[in-house]
Image: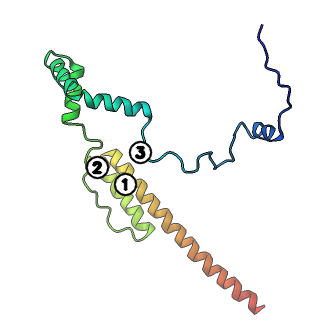
Amino acid sequence: MSKKRESSRPMSAEKIKKKSAGGRPFKKGQSGNPAGRPRGLRNKATRKVMAMLEAESDAITRSLIASAKQGDSTALRIIVDRLAPAPRTPAREPYDVGPLDSVGDCVNALRRIVVDVASGELPGDHADEIAARIKDQARIMESEEFERRIEILERAAGQQGRLQ
């Protein structure tokens, strides 16, 4: 039989409010510790493990090398990864898209990219990245052009209103 805790006091208005706010003890965007955890501060357990590893680093390194010499592929992989880590991203050759002074220039640059991908001169994933930037540039130019046109129309409408 489970015992249910019975409270002799009714809940305070503040507790009821906290419960009804989705179980959040603080207002949205406000924490109980505004200063927060300092940047770079590590967890207490992590600091202890790091201190232990630092104290035993020579012995661990010797053991790892000995295991690798005996044919332990995992130990060998750890050593190789530390000595010659794989590059994070392959180096890409720069791709000249030419000047992008108009939406038409952007369209022509995208056409050149399609041709270069088809001929094998430009890898597809690299082409996707470049094309996305060119499309962003074209959208910006289109927005600027719309804004310019709207301003002209508003000025013309304002002058027409004064004439009537």
Q: Earlier in the sequence, mark 3 or mark 1?
A: 3
| Outermost residue toward the front in this view | 8
Residue nearest the viewer, comparing 121 with 84: 84
Please state the horizontal and vertical placement of residue 48, each as a whole percent of the image. 37, 30
Quarter of the image for residue 84 reads top left
What is the three-letter code of the residue carrying label 1?
A: Ile
Hey, which residue is sitting farthest top in the picture?
1
**Residue 37 at x, y = what percent?**
50, 45
Q: CA distance from mark 3 to mark 1?
A: 35 Å
**Which element carries disc 3, helix, strand or loop?**
loop
Q: CA distance from mark 1 to mark 2?
A: 10 Å
Q: Which residue is mark 1?
A: 130
Give the colouring mode of the picture.
Answer: rainbow
Q: Is residue 82 left or right of residue 32?
A: left
Residue at horizontal 24 percent and vertical 37 percent from the top? 86
Of marks 1 and 2, the one in the foreground: 1
Name the residue beneath numbered marker 2. Answer: 122
Query: 128 and 58: which one is in front?
Result: 58
Dot 3 crowding, Cα within 10 Å, few <14, some 14–19, many 20+ = few
In the rendered structure, which disc, 1 or 2, sits on the residue that comes first in sequence?
Answer: 2
Residue at the spot x=29%, y=61% of the render? 96
Residue 118 numbered tag: none
Question: Which residue corresponds to the image point at 35% horizontal and 50% vertical from the top-left?
Answer: 127
Q: Secondary structure at mark 2?
A: loop
Q: Is 140 placed above or below 35 here?
A: below
Dot 3 or dot 2, earlier in sequence: 3
Q: Quadrant of residue 77?
A: top left
Q: Are marks 1 and 2 in contact (CB under 8 Å)?
A: yes
Quadrant of the rendered image containing residue 147 = bottom right
Neighbourhood count class around disc 1 (C-alpha, 10 Å): few under 14, some 14–19, many 20 upward: some
The local secondary structure at tag 1 comes to: helix
Residue carrying label 3 = 40
